[in-house]
């Protein structure tokens, strides 16, 4: 499954992404804005584990490589919740530091949202942003997400405390 973007495409991860993924993800500025499930440092073994996880996921694809000009530049994905939250999906994304401020994350999120709404029984999408990362909030807002809540001092990352911002999107509403 591939999804077109105006400036690139979203595609499944492949074994050939190993070195590029490790290089891009092994950046403290990326790690600083993601959950602690994202390792730091990020090495080739981490890239192998992530690619294998994505391959095992099967169809429909939920995690994509972001590619621009034939080059891996980041990742974006969907985590489907279950139980009482069935029909809710968490979205997450990151773009390599050298590719910031080019609209890549916004285009990737637009493509992902369109695909998710068409492919999954979703009634709500949501995303969490660390308070010190307003750029990520702007990406979400450009894609129709609304800031629904700010939880003061809810995040501790690298020894620093910040707010947790929760954004939501209810499709077709």
Image (cartoon, rainbow, N blue to C red):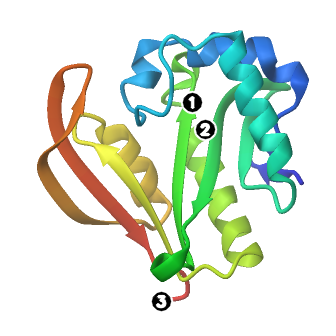
Q: Mark 3: which secondary structure?
A: loop
- In this rendering, position of residue 111 left or right of residue 97: right
- The alpha-carbon separation of the residues under discs 1 and 3 comes to 29 Å
Image coords of residue 93 (percent x, y): 55, 42
Q: State the residue at coordinates (54%, 68%).
A: 81
SS for dot 1: strand
Residue labelled with disc 2: 104
Is residue 21 positioned above or below 139 on the image?
A: above
Q: Are marks 1 and 3 in contact (CB under 8 Å)?
A: no
C-alpha gap between disc 1 and disc 2: 8 Å
Q: Residue furthest bottom?
A: 173
Q: Residue furthest front?
A: 83
Q: Seen from this angle, which residue lies furthest left? A: 152
Foreground disc of the pair 1, 2:
1
Crowd around label 3: few <14 · some 14–19 · many ≥20 (10 Å) = few
> Is residue 96 rendered to the left or right of residue 121?
left
- Disc 1 crowd rating (10 Å Cα; few below 14, some 14-19, many 20+) is many
Sequence order check, earlier mark of 1 and 2: 1
Residue 58, quarter of picture = bottom right
Circles 1 and 2 in contact, beta carbons < 8 Å: yes
Sequence order check, earlier mark of 2 and 3: 2
Q: Position of residue 63 (x, y in %)?
A: 71, 47
Q: Which residue is mark 3?
A: 173
Residue appearing at x 64%, y 10% in the figure: 43
User: Would you identify the image quadrant in which residue 20 lies?
Assistant: top right
Q: Estimate the spatial distance between the alpha carbons at disc 2 and disc 3, rounded to whole Å.
A: 26 Å
Q: Nearer the viewer, mark 2 or mark 3?
A: 3
Element under disc 2: helix
Instruction: Indicate the quadrant where residue 23 lies.
Output: top right
First-in-chain label (1 vs 3): 1
Residue drawn at x 77%, y 22% is 48
Label 1 sits on residue: 95
């Amino acid at each position: 499954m591939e999804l077109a973007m105006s400036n690139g495409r979203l595609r499944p991860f492949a074994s050939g992404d190993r070195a590029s993924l490790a290089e891009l993800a092994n950046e403290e500025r990326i790690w600083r804005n993601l959950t602690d499930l994202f390792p730091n440092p990020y090495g080739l073994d981490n890239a192998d584990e992530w690619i294998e996880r994505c391959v095992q996921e099967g169809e429909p694809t939920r995690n994509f490589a972001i590619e621009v000009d034939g080059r891996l530049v980041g990742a974006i994905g969907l985590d489907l919740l279950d139980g009482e939250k069935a029909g809710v999906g968490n979205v997450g994304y990151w773009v390599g530091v050298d590719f910031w401020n080019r609209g890549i994350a916004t285009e990737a999120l637009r493509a992902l949202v369109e695909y998710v709404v068409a492919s999954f029984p979703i009634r709500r999408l949501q995303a969490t942003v660390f308070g010190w990362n307003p750029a990520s909030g702007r990406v979400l807002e450009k894609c129709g997400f609304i800031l629904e809540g700010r939880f003061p001092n809810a995040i501790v990352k690298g020894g620093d405390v910040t707010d947790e911002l929760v954004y939501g999107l209810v499709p077709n509403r």
